Amino acid sequence: MQVLVRYCIILLLVCVTAAASGQYYLRGEVKTEQNTALQNARIFLHTAKANYYSGADGSFGIIMRQQEDTVTITLDGYEPQTLHVKAGIWQRITLKSIITKATKNKNKLISITMDKKQTHTAKWSVSDETYFQLVENEFVETAVYPNTGYSLNVNKASYSNVRRFINGSSEVPPDAVKIEEMVNYFNLIYTEPERGKTFAVTSTTSDCPWNTQDRLLFVNVCARKLSLDSIPPANFVFLIDVSGSMDDEKRLPLVQAAFQLFVKNIRPIDTVSIVTYGGGVRVWLQPTSGSEKSVISNAIEELLPNGDTPGEAALQTAYTLAQKTFIKGGNNRIILATDGDFNVGETGEKELEELVARYKNLGIYLTCLGVGTGNLKDSKLQVLAKKGNGNYAYLDDLNEAEKTLVQELTQTMYAVADNALLNVEFNPKVVGQYRLIGFDNRRTAMNEADYLLEGGEVGSGSSVLAIFQYTPQGTQNSTDELARLQIRYAVGKDTSAYRVSHTVNQSYIPFDTLEQPLQFATAVTAFGLKLKNSSYAKINWDQIMELSMYANKSQFLQNEFATLVEKAMYIYEPKRKKKAGKKKKP
């Protein structure tokens, strides 16, 4: 009997010990009060201090090291919720929509350093166009603030918009110049990630042409490519502005031509709908199979401009239609094409952000295409795309439309990662000070006391090149690392927060022997700094012209850039053009 009791006690201790050292599984779902699944809700596990995310159907599964814990669930447009949870019990979590939008919808940043300062920038107006007033990133002392970070979601609208101004013989509004967008417009370097990996990261250091005391650090992040044969079916809703302001050959006719190009790549498994707004909102084309290309094409061809711009009501209609035709596990996306003029409805950017964010959380994303001159609402389109987890492109001609919607189709429309952020920690032993070039934040966001760094969607086969300017100190070319990088992102239905690490070694390469794409990226950066009238652009037009010679003349876009620099030089220094004209006379 005593042996049996002793055996039972030992068995009980073994079971308790196994449970204590084992793992527990927490499962559940996140939904709205209307029982609609919420995707990408952030689930913070307090004990582990780790973030997880709900999948496309709102469900999640988390491995815990203890049977009970506390979680906090947050999502844009919804009230945060903290609750005590227990493994083995299905968690049905309901998030309530935030009603008081203006007070609870916080601004978010695209880059962040703890020592954030604000430089003075003059206000600039161009007809009825609107741009965010930007705050240029300053130099930061590494010993005090070694960490910085930025979003891997980079639009490309700025370069084509800058090109539009210069080709029109006009100076460029400084706030229209977004250097990271200009550099990444060219898709300069692509490195295929290793099999099974989402990202490939490379880094290089070289000389800084506009400051011989400093160096440049190039950080390039490439996303894996999806095959068009294997990507999931798509549910596209074309939301097209046909208001009176679109009555111009560079507006509605360009949009029609752009969508005609896009339709050529639609597959039978895809669905297309069209919502128009102009003098009212109308479902112009009911959901139609991609196999009926002629029906879709004819519907696009028949569009005519007329009336006012009920933009907010049109967005709501498009989202409602996208929700009715929602493809579970598919690419559900609204493609908005407009000059950005929302003059009827909830025109405030905060209200529009709130609307777009709610549907993004349901798995319906938003891509924005801007067109037109003199009325472009760049600021609104940028916000909508960012909040819609999509991207924003400016179409100044048909070539740009083909680049965006045909050549870069998968980059623009199909994501391989969500909520992607990159953090950089510099080594104060070898870096005295540094600054991130571009990725400038809106002044309103910088004024917000409660700010957040916002990640974003990363398209298939895309590459994001970021450039830091830094001042070396201590012994260079030593075994000491220059910096450490970490990418954090989520993937589709997976609720885990994935991480990729990369060590930046002091692999300095003289600028003359640097690979051509990075030399060209430096030229684009210098050009952008000059157009912004940056206090850090200690460089003249002759030097920028010299750098532009690093353009690959066999590539149309790079060759065009060199011509653009020359045009800009004559715009900003008209006396130079007169002198050049005099020299040509016999």
Image: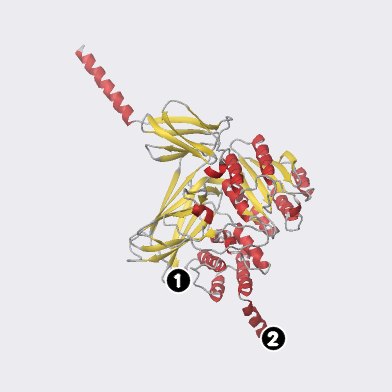
- Residue reaching furthest left? 2
Residue 305: horizontal and vertical position, in percent?
77, 51
Q: Position of residue 314 (x, y in %)?
A: 69, 43
Name the residue: 65% across, 65% down.
Answer: 165
Labels 1 and 2: the sequence-earlier one:
1
Q: Position of residue 312 (x, y in %)?
A: 67, 44
- Numbered disc total: 2
Neighbour tally class for label 2: few under 14, some 14-19, many 20 plus, Cα within 10 Å:
few
| Residue at the spot of label 2 | 585
The residue positioned 38% from the left and 66% from the top of the image is: 472
Tell whether 484 sits left or right of 416: left
Name the kind of residue labelled 2 in the image.
Lys
- In the picture provided, is 358 more to the left or to the right than 193? right
Picture quadrant of residue 479 = bottom left
Quick check: 304 left or right of 63? right
Mark 1 and mark 2: Cα distance apart in space: 38 Å
Position above or below: 27 against 219: above
Amino acid at the residue labelled 1? Asn
Q: Secondary structure at mark 1?
A: loop
Disc number lying in front (1 or 2): 1
Disc 1 crowd rating (10 Å Cα; few below 14, some 14-19, many 20+) is some
Give whichever of 259, 48 is nearer the camera.
Answer: 48
**46 lies above or below 183:** above
Q: Are marks 1 and 2 in contact (CB under 8 Å)?
A: no
Tag 1 residue: 211
**Residue 244 in the image: x percent, y percent?**
76, 52
Task: Give the secondary structure at mark 2.
Answer: loop
